[in-house]
């Protein structure tokens, strides 16, 4: 994970495992038993419930010295609870300001939620987990911006949290935004089968033209896009290589309490060109699978 995050332009930080009580309260606070009886400094008096406050404080110090744009990460323990089993091993990172240095060919943009999501997914993929299949939920901790944050889950286990840092937290820590963050919870990650060798699998490239089809479904407004994507992909795992959400619409024409989700489905034949009948058969399975999974209907 360290090599990957460094390769993504982030700088590793090493910070104390304790912090001021005021900062800890912004990140869930700590139990009285986690207060230090003999701290090395009067303002480092509690064990950290999260690594992020330390990284954000480092960002504030850098900004005060004229370094407005930066990306930091740290891998280490955090202590959200008083029991020994509450200690967590976490990879946490932040991006603050712009995405990159000034360059004649492109204008840098402010960091956003998708940057943090990409960092989290890249770490999970590097660890051998199916990051692209993880469910995205909107239950990120309170120090993230509601509506601009999320979690990555496999079943009930929360693998990671990501998103924009809450404006109130940035103000309290004197950080000038935009700022995004992610946290990877190593203790929640499922075991990954050891690789038989370090060699990458043989790359098979098809010489046949892929086929793309668009579908739009009207579903209840609270149905997550991941349900539609996963159901479409499961319709034919041998042929369907990619499912992408490209449009979300709520308003006139779809009904009260409803929304339209449009997806692009790519079929990649391997040994022969698909006939129209075969393509239609897969399309029918996609439609049936999504309707069954969501209770929605095909938008016509």
Image: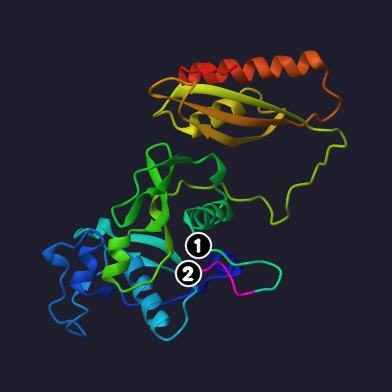
Write down the quadrant of residue 170 in the picture: bottom left
**Does residue 203 show up magenta in the picture?**
no
**In the rendered image, the vertical position of residue 294 relative to residue 138, given as above or below:** above
**Quick one: 264 or 252, which is closer to the camera?**
252
**In the rendered image, the vertical position of residue 275 relative to residue 245, given as above or below:** above
Label 2 vs label 1: CA separation? 6 Å
Who's the residue at 44% across and 65% down the image? 93
- Are the residues tagged 2 and 1 within 8 Å (C-beta)? yes
Task: Give the labeled residue for mark 2.
Answer: 97
Label 1 Cα neighbours within 10 Å, binned few <14 / some 14-19 / many ≥20: many
Q: State the extent of the magenta-drawn residues as a range.
A: 96-102
Task: Give the labeled residue for mark 1.
Answer: 111
Which quarter of the rendered picture does the C terminus lie within?
top right
Label 2 Cα neighbours within 10 Å, binned few <14 / some 14-19 / many ≥20: many
Q: Is residue 235 left or right of residue 16?
A: right
Who's the residue at 21% across and 75% down the image? 20
């Amino acid at each position: 994970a360290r090599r990957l995050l460094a390769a993504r332009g982030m700088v590793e930080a090493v910070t104390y495992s304790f912090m001021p009580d005021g900062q800890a309260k912004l990140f869930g606070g700590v139990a009285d038993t986690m207060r230090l009886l003999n701290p090395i400094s009067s303002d480092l008096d509690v064990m950290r419930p999260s690594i992020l406050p330390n990284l954000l404080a480092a960002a504030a110090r850098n900004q005060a010295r004229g370094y407005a744009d930066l990306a930091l990460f740290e891998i280490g323990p955090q202590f959200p609870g008083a029991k020994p089993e509450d200690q967590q091993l976490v990879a946490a990172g932040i991006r603050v300001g712009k995405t990159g240095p000034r360059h004649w060919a492109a204008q840098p943009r402010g960091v956003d939620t998708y940057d943090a999501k990409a960092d989290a997914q890249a770490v999970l993929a590097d660890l051998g987990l199916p990051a692209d299949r993880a469910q995205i939920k909107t239950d990120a901790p309170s120090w993230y911006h509601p509506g601009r944050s999320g979690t990555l889950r496999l079943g009930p286990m929360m693998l990671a949290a990501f998103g924009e840092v809450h404006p109130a937290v940035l103000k309290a820590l004197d950080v000038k935004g935009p700022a995004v963050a992610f946290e990877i919870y190593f203790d929640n990650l499922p075991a990954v089968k050891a690789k038989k060798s370090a060699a990458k699998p043989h790359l098979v490239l098809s010489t046949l033209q892929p086929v793309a089809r668009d579908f739009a479904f009207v579903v209840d407004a609270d149905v997550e896009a991941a349900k539609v994507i996963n159901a479409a992909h499961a319709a034919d795992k041998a042929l369907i290589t990619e499912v992408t959400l490209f449009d979300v619409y709520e308003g006139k024409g779809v009904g009260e309490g409803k929304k339209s989700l449009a997806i692009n489905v790519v079929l990649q034949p391997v040994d022969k060109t698909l006939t129209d009948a075969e393509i239609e058969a897969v399309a029918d399975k996609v439609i049936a699978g999504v309707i069954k999974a969501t209770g929605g209907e095909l938008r016509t």
